[in-house]
């Protein structure tokens, strides 16, 4: 061993100690990060769990034409306008013959959801043969009752008498706990038990479609032009700097811009996914441009030289070689950008997408809301049941984001080529 | 600046050493051959029999040297793939040692003739012209080796030109000896030996001339063998210092 | 000694005095390329300084010189590849078959189809081996049918000495080949469009002796129909394949002449020093 070997040996222990310390620090920070994430996720999951189930009341009922106030052979129109509320209430009263006071009757009727009459109506409309026949129907219980049943605690929102009725019903096996379909099939509602996310989800999808349709082609084209064709001068530098700055502009500013330009100047409809998508497109454009440019830049110049050297024109070189090679990076950028847009609430508040909308939107111009805003709205609602619903909506949003990121990774893996 | 070909400034030190060593070996061989010639002449003139025996047998050493140098040249060709002046140096050396070996052979002959003449009681000392020729050839060989080691084109060309004088001298010796043989046919055998000795010396002159031509090739990159020197001299008038 | 100094001067061109004046025979009677007073700048870096030379039809010219002396730059002047570098400026008179290639009327796309290039580093497209070779012919519409294209691809691969190795995997990616195979693929790709002139930038630097021999044989064979300019760092290779050799030094053409002459008895001390491995 020569002298240097000895010296190096002396420093080795120190170096390894340093390395170990650094690794420890790294592991601690990763662990802390994961811990926070797990706590957050578990918290949300735990809170959201009740929102995924609901209590139903199953009772036998006769679609009595008299009670409904329709003739023996009613038209669809007649059936639609029939007195279902009376029918369902009477059915419920029949279960508790001892209740005679009007006050008590009202409290008894409050056990079932206000949407119960629509449920039995829809059942009849779907199958008119049920008229004057017996059927076992399943109707929603009121959210307060639902909350009471889920927690089994007194919250003051149901009184003693109601509790005893509920217990009676429960003992007779009429109360059932089932999956909360409404969460995924309904639009928003004032009543938590029938409020759902479909409206917001569709709103988000419409907005996202517009956003991608607008920002992807424009962003990619802008990136290609800036990277491959633009002359290098002060103007282009200025544009570059501005694009980078744009990516850092607070998103609410884009909302203000959308309000001023799309609503006030162009007179587009308020609360429409079309406008939301356009605003989100403005928001994602810088991200897509920056990501696409760096993807294009990372295509090795030797590929360009190879194509040009064979006599390909600039255009052919770019579109036959550079862009396909940059595609995974571009797609990743676009998806990450739109994932950000999907989670964005602030700019959409400015263009009225915060309105309370019950109907599920059926087009780009129907008024609607989006998932993050739905979360915001529910978080703001007083009903206790909405606490769990908020968390449930958050989970749905997170699942969406995870899917999009997964898609980004998959696309990259799929299209990635080595060179 | 001594000479335009400097073999000691390659980036590879080992290459420098190899070429230097090669050149030294050639010089050693040259020295060996020079001594052989000297001894041969001395043996011839002084009828020094032990010396003559030595000359006759020492040629093996020269031959061994030639083989050793040859091997080194091959190694350098294989490992270094020399170009330009280095290539010419190696090529010149390969050819030079060939000529040197032949000079050695001729010197060996001188030794053998000395023994033969002694056995027949003849003395070369009677032939002053041979003595003269021997001196000239020795000078020529030593100048040749000098020109080679210094890569001196001027001196090489002068030496090439001096070969003509040697040829003339040989011609006159031949005339003399011919008339002698006609006068005294009883000594034809001895006289013939003397003639052969002169012939050997003349051959050595030719070999020296060859080596000088290699020096010109090595330095100028032009082959002057079998062509007239005149053309070269016309092209490079500065070479002619006479 | 006065005489020896005189001899010295006439013998070898003196380094300081004569750098800039090309020595040797850089001009030819017949010209494929005729270059006069070519200068190339990268920004302020004067990378090629006043170089004039001819390249004769059907000859192989070797460009040699130390790293960074401008060989690649000069080669790229010949097919206007330098156009793609923003800071690069080229001036001088450069003619291919008498046409000024830097003239406005000259289409660089057409020029590059006529003057093909093999680059210093192998750069196959991340496509299949077949598509790599077929790209050029398809681009220029050189094949009228699939069978014809197949034929071009196979002969090109064969001439580049690669067909045997890849015959059964033409649809595998070209980037999956070894470095030497990639380089031969790039050569096949270049000859597939049958350019008039082929520029090669150290095509054999990553090849084994057999592959190198195949390429050198190809170059020899191509010489019958094409003109070839090749940059190489292997003196032996330059000596083996070229008819004339040009030695570059610090952006200048120091010496150009018949290859035998350059490698046995160059006129310039710099050339001599370079090819014999001496300190400059
Ligand atoms: N794209 C470029 N931008 C700026 N300067 C460049 C560029 N390409 C080459 N140069 C400069 O031009 C000079 C010549 O480079 P070039 O690539 O022609 O050298 P070369 O002789 O091919 O070297 P090598 O043998 O290492 O390939 C170098 O000084 C280099 O720094
Ligand atoms: Mg280069």
Image (tube, coloured by chain):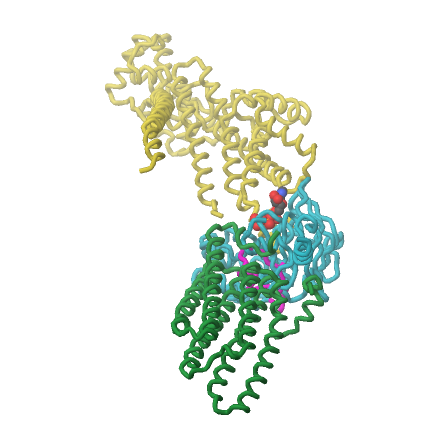
Chain colours: A yellow, B green, C cyan
Of A107 and A148, which appears nearest the observer? A148
Q: Is residue A57 above or below residue B199?
A: above
Q: Residue at x 46, y 37 (%)?
A: A408
Q: Residue at x 40, y 70 (%)?
A: B58
Looking at the rendering, which quadrant does residue C110 occupy? bottom right
Lateral position of residue A394 relative to residue B198, left or right: left
Q: Residue furthest left?
A: A171
Of A216 and B162, which appears nearest the observer? B162
Residue B156 percent across, percent down from the top left: 60, 65
Residue C142 percent across, percent down from the top left: 61, 63
Of B227 and C144, which appears nearest the observer? B227
Of A85 and A409, which appears nearest the observer? A409
Q: Is residue C79 above or below residue A191?
A: below
Q: Residue at x 63, y 64 (%)?
A: C258
Report the quarter where the N terminus of chain A lies.
top left
Q: Is residue A94 above or below residue B108?
A: above
Lateral position of residue C53 relative to residue C166, left or right: right
Q: Residue at x 57, y 25 (%)?
A: A248
Residue B233 percent across, percent down from the top left: 69, 67
Which residues are the magenta region? C223-245
Residue C228 magenta-highlighted: yes
Residue C271 magenta-highlighted: no
Examine the rendering and report whether any part of residue C230 can be seen: yes
């Amino acid at each position: 061993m020569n002298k240097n070997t000895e010296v190096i040996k002396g420093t080795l222990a120190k170096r390894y100690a340093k390395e170990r310390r650094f690794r420890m620090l790294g592991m601690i920070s990763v662990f802390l990060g994961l811990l926070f994430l797990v706590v957050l996720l578990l918290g949300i999951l735990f809170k959201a769990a009740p929102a995924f189930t609901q209590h139903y009341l199953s009772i036998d009922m006769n679609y009595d034409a008299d009670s409904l106030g329709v003739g023996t052979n009613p038209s669809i129109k007649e059936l639609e306008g029939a007195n279902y509320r009376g029918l369902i209430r009477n059915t419920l009263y029949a279960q508790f013959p001892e209740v005679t006071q009007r006050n008590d009757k009202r409290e008894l009727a409050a056990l079932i959801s206000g949407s119960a009459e629509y449920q039995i109506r829809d059942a009849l409309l779907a199958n008119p043969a049920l008229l004057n026949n017996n059927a076992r129907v399943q109707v929603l219980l009121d959210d307060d009752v639902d909350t009471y049943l889920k927690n089994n605690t007194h919250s003051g929102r149901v009184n003693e008498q109601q509790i005893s009725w509920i217990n009676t019903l429960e003992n007779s096996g009429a109360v059932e706990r089932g999956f909360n379909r409404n969460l995924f099939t309904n639009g928003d509602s004032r009543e938590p038990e029938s409020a759902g996310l479909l409206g917001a989800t569709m709103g988000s999808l419409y907005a996202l479609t517009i956003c991608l349709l607008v920002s992807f082609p424009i962003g990619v084209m802008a990136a290609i032009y800036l990277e491959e064709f633009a002359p290098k001068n002060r103007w282009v530098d200025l544009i570059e700097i501005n694009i980078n700055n744009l990516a850092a502009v607070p998103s609410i500013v884009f909302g203000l811009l959308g309000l001023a330009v799309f609503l006030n100047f162009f007179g587009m409809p308020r609360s429409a996914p079309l406008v939301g998508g356009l605003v989100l497109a403005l928001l994602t454009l810088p991200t897509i441009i920056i990501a696409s440019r760096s993807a294009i830049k990372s295509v090795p110049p030797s590929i360009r030289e190879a194509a040009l050297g064979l006599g390909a024109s600039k255009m052919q070189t770019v579109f036959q070689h550079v862009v396909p090679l940059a595609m995974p990076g571009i797609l990743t950028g676009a998806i990450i950008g739109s994932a950000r847009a999907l989670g964005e609430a602030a700019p959409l508040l400015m263009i009225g997408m915060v309105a309370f909308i019950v109907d599920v939107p059926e087009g780009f111009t129907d008024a609607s809301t989006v998932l993050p805003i739905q979360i915001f709205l529910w978080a703001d609602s007083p009903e206790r049941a909405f606490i769990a619903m908020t968390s449930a909506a958050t989970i749905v949003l997170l699942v969406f984001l995870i899917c999009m990121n997964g898609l980004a990774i998959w696309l990259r893996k799929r299209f990635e080529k080595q060179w | 600046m001594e000479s335009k070909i400097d073999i000691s400034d390659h980036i590879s030190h080992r290459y420098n050493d190899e070429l230097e060593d090669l050149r030294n070996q050639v010089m050693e061989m040259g020295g060996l051959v020079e001594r052989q010639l000297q001894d041969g002449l001395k043996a011839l003139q002084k009828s020094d029999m032990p010396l003559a025996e030595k000359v006759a047998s020492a040629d093996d050493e020269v031959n061994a040297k030639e083989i050793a140098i040859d091997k080194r040249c091959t190694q350098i060709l294989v490992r270094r793939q020399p170009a330009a002046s280095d290539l010419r140096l190696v090529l010149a050396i390969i050819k030079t040692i060939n000529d040197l070996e032949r000079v050695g052979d001729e010197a060996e002959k001188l030794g053998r003739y000395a023994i033969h003449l002694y056995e027949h009681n003849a003395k070369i000392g009677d032939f002053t012209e041979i003595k003269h020729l021997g001196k000239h050839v020795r000078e020529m060989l030593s100048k040749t080796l000098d020109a080679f080691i210094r890569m001196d084109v001027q001196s090489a060309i002068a030496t090439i030109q001096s070969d003509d004088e040697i040829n003339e001298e040989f011609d006159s010796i031949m005339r003399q000896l011919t008339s002698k043989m006609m006068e005294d046919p009883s000594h034809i055998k001895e006289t013939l030996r003397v003639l052969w000795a002169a012939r050997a010396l003349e051959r050595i002159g030719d070999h020296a001339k060859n080596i000088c031509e290699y020096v010109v090739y090595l330095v100028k990159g032009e082959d002057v063998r079998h062509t007239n020197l005149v053309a070269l001299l016309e092209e490079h008038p500065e070479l002619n210092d006479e | 000694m006065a005489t020896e100094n005189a001899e010295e001067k006439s013998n070898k061109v003196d380094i300081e005095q004569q750098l800039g004046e090309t020595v040797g025979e850089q001009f030819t009677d017949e010209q494929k390329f005729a270059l006069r007073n070519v200068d190339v700048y990268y920004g302020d870096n004067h990378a090629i300084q006043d170089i004039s030379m001819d390249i004769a039809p059907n000859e192989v010219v070797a460009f040699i010189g130390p790293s960074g002396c401008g060989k690649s730059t000069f080669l790229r002047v010949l097919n206007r590849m330098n156009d793609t570098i923003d800071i690069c400026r080229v001036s001088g008179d450069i003619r291919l078959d008498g046409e000024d290639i830097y003239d406005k009327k000259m289409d660089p796309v057409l020029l590059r189809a006529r003057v093909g290039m093999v680059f210093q580093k192998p750069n196959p497209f991340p496509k299949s081996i077949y598509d790599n070779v077929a790209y050029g012919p398809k681009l220029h519409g050189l094949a009228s049918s699939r069978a014809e294209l197949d034929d071009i691809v196979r002969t090109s691969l064969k001439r580049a000495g690669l067909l045997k190795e890849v015959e059964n995997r033409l649809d595998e990616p070209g980037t999956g080949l070894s470095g030497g195979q990639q380089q031969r693929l790039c050569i096949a790709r270049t000859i597939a469009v049958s350019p008039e002139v082929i520029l090669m930038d150290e095509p054999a630097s990553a090849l084994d002796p057999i592959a190198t021999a195949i390429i050198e044989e190809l170059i020899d064979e191509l010489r019958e129909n094409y003109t070839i300019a090749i940059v190489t760092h292997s003196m032996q290779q330059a000596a083996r394949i070229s008819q004339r050799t040009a030695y570059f030094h610090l952006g200048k053409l120091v010496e150009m002449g018949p290859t035998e002459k350059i490698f046995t008895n160059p006129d310039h001390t710099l050339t001599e020093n370079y090819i014999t491995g001496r300190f400059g």
